[in-house]
Image (spheres, grey):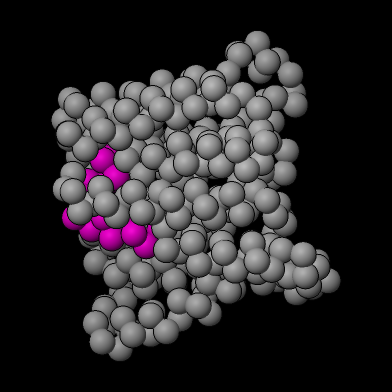
Amino acid sequence: MTSFAVTLILIAAFAHAGWNFLAKKACGGTAFIWLFASLSAIIYLPMALWILIVQKPELSWPALTVIIISAIIHSLYFILLNKGYQIGDLSLIYPLARGTGPLLSTIIAILFLGERPTSIALIGTLLIAFGIIIITGNPMKLKEVAARKPMLFAILCGSCIAAYTITDKIAVSLLVIPPLLFDWATNLGRVCLLTPYALKNWEEVKEQWAINKKEAIGVSILSPLAYILVLTAMVFSPVSYIAPAREISILVGTIMGAKLLAEENLKVRLAGASAMVAGLFALTLG
């Protein structure tokens, strides 16, 4: 993985952890998701139009199909993530969700996309897996329903991450859809999918705008920015490297949850996050 790709991933990591902090702070439900998705569609519209007019990318039926599939998966991801944040800590949900995704992405990339990461890169992936085990904490607590439920939502989020990582890799590398245009199109698809809910619950949308306006604007800017940077790196880097490497945001998100939201178990969760950071260095060397 090149130094340029690593730079893009590091910037994306801070942007990604930032918008997750804002989403956890708001916990605004589906109305909040529709709100920031709509704002994103408006904010990034000029750049999307510029790409359409200047670059004139070919949007074939396979490309449109991938956009629709990605929009559906991303919508499910945001809904599950919001559910997880409503009942669990940022420093638990965020690392577990982000860690599960790259493990599945790497396995799928090796089995179905023919990618062959080096031994060092595979060690990095295993370090990330080890970090997940540490972060989940005492296994005896998993007997409690209250402890299992947040983890379940986090793992389901991770499954969505794996699914859209592979789908989006195909979109930007094989179908050559410009990353910014692709992200904007999938976001617009999310708006369309959630608009019936928003119209039916318009009072809830207005309430979210009144109480979580700053958070909605922040997520609407940072969420696309983070993923556009990742998609750009995917254009010229293997997904089996990119997917695990971007999870350095786990360390940032864990610290945010502990310090800014006063969440517990900081030492244990930082230890797990540190193992994931070690995995990043291994992937960089690979």
Q: Is any part of residue 196 visible from this angle?
A: yes
Relative vertical location of residue 197 with respect to residue 132 in this rendering, above or below: below
- The magenta span reads 227-242
Q: Position of residue 134 (x, y in %)?
A: 50, 19
Place residue 153 in its image quadrant.
top right
Q: Position of residue 87 (x, y in %)?
A: 73, 38
**Which part of the image, by quadrant, shows the C terminus?**
top left
In the visual, does 212 lie left or right of 235? Answer: right
Q: Is any part of residue 159 visible from this angle?
A: no
Q: Residue at x 66, y 41 (%)?
A: 261
Place residue 111 in its image quadrant.
top left
**Which part of the image, by quadrant, shows the N terminus?**
top left
Q: Position of residue 77 (x, y in %)?
A: 55, 50
Q: Residue at x 83, y 71 (%)?
A: 203
Relative vertical location of residue 264 with respect to residue 43 in this rendering, above or below: above
Q: Is residue 230 magenta?
A: yes
For this orientation, the residue located farthest to the bottom is 53
Residue toward you, 198 or 92: 92
